[in-house]
Image (cartoon, rainbow, N blue to C red):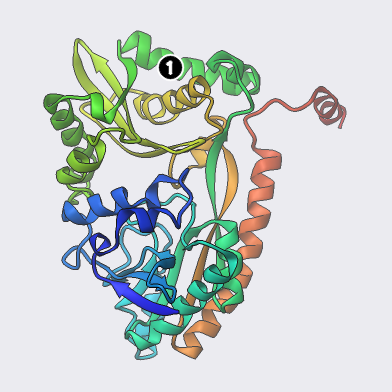
Amino acid sequence: MQIRYHHAIGEIPAAQWDALFDTGYPFTRHAFLAALEDSGSVTAETGWEPEHLVLYDDAGVPCAAAPHYRKHHSYGEFVFDFQWADAAHRIGCSYYPKGVSAIPFTPSGGPRLGARDAASKTQLAQALHQTGAQRGLSSQHILFAQAEDASALGEAGFLLREDVQFHFRNRGYANFDDYLAALSSAKRKKIRRERRRVQEEAGVRFRVARGDALDDAAWARIYALYAHTYHVRGQSPYLREGFWQQYGRAAGTPVRVILGERDAEIVACALCVQGADTLYGRHWGCSEEIHSLHFETCYYQGISYCIDQGLARFDAGTQGGHKLMRGFEPVLTYSLHWLAEPRLHEAVADFLQRERAVIESGRERLAAEHSAYRQPESEAAGANAR
């Protein structure tokens, strides 16, 4: 088995890379990663230096691979380790560069270890663990891994970290009203009121368009709105315009754009990517402040689209206690970590053990006590009796 790190995804034939990953998950596909690099969104200059790990068999054919980057900061990851970096500094260690196996700017769980069989996946997990220190990395971090990958990485010596996201699960709803009927009366009324504010009172109308069906003018407007969400915070957009030109407008692209329009002008948009059974909501933008516009554009339109298209799930991104009251449910996410400095690794292991207990009990409590969905009649009756 030969281990090789590639400094550009373009060094690896697309067909060979894609053959190792789940075709239903869009973000590990060669086209997505290539657009990040080709557009200049992901480069050494932006702090994401590509070092994609590939294992080759004796015939020189890739049998396992992982998207991988040498990171010079911790931004754009959404699994926060700034305190770990500070602890490393206090004991006289350099935390950067570190190794990150993740999808840049994309906090959505999915495959991180692509492999043609279980044995190759095990070897890939071990290679990530063993080659980190050899390459001058302080640590290795595999972010938003699916459960199967987390298991293989745990066996290779990585530490498990959990967190909570909020996803919408389609229970076979016939339409949006059918979904609303499953919610408690208070939550149902709140959502209807928010939708009226946007669609009736503000007069914004919505449609969903494929990225390859939109013209130059529409894409220019969409990117301007997306970039505005960063500019108001004094930041530069993570994704450069060339990314959307290459990936969002490619024939057959999985990009779906939710457009909020008024008087033929786009006033809001949400940029989403459609997988085999999941809609991934990634970015949004708007030109004016309208009450509840964010909820309508980024949540309710996505839920409606999932129901109409028969998709099983809507992953609308990170954060989101406010998602809970709108029908999203708490799910666990998994990240794996190894640190070369033994003292730091031990301290992080102790911290993560305690953190997992809090995360897991918190997720259970949220699901049980703060769900937006109606309780079964027997449970409701019992609650009232108590």
Tell me how many marks there are: 1
Foreground: 304 or 37?
Answer: 37
Quarter occupied by residue 272? top left
Residue at image position (59%, 29%) is 170
Residue at image position (59%, 78%) is 350
Note whether residue 230 is visible: yes
Note whether residue 324 is visible: no
Residue 69 position, x and y percent, is 31, 68
With 370 as the anchor, is 243 left or right in this view?
left
Q: Compared with residue 78, is residue 89 higher up or lower down, i.e. above or below?
A: below
Q: What element carries label 1?
A: helix
Q: Quadrant of the N terminus?
A: bottom left
Q: In which quarter of the image is the C terminus?
A: top right
With 201 as the anchor, is 318 left or right in this view?
right
Quarter occupied by residue 287? top left
Q: Compared with residue 183, is residue 153 higher up or lower down, i.e. above or below?
A: below
Residue 8 position, x and y percent, is 24, 65
Quarter occupied by residue 85? bottom left
With 10 as the anchor, is 384 left or right in this view?
right
Residue at image position (37%, 63%) is 67
Specify few, some or many for label 1: CA neighbours under 10 Å numbering under 14, 14-19, or 20 or more: many
Foreground: 319 or 201?
Answer: 319
Q: Compared with residue 332, is residue 263 higher up or lower down, i.e. above or below?
A: above
Q: Name the residue under label 1.
A: 195
Q: Three-letter amino acid code at disc 1? A: Arg
Residue 166 position, x and y percent, is 53, 42
Q: Compared with residue 260, is residue 286 higher up or lower down, i.e. above or below?
A: below
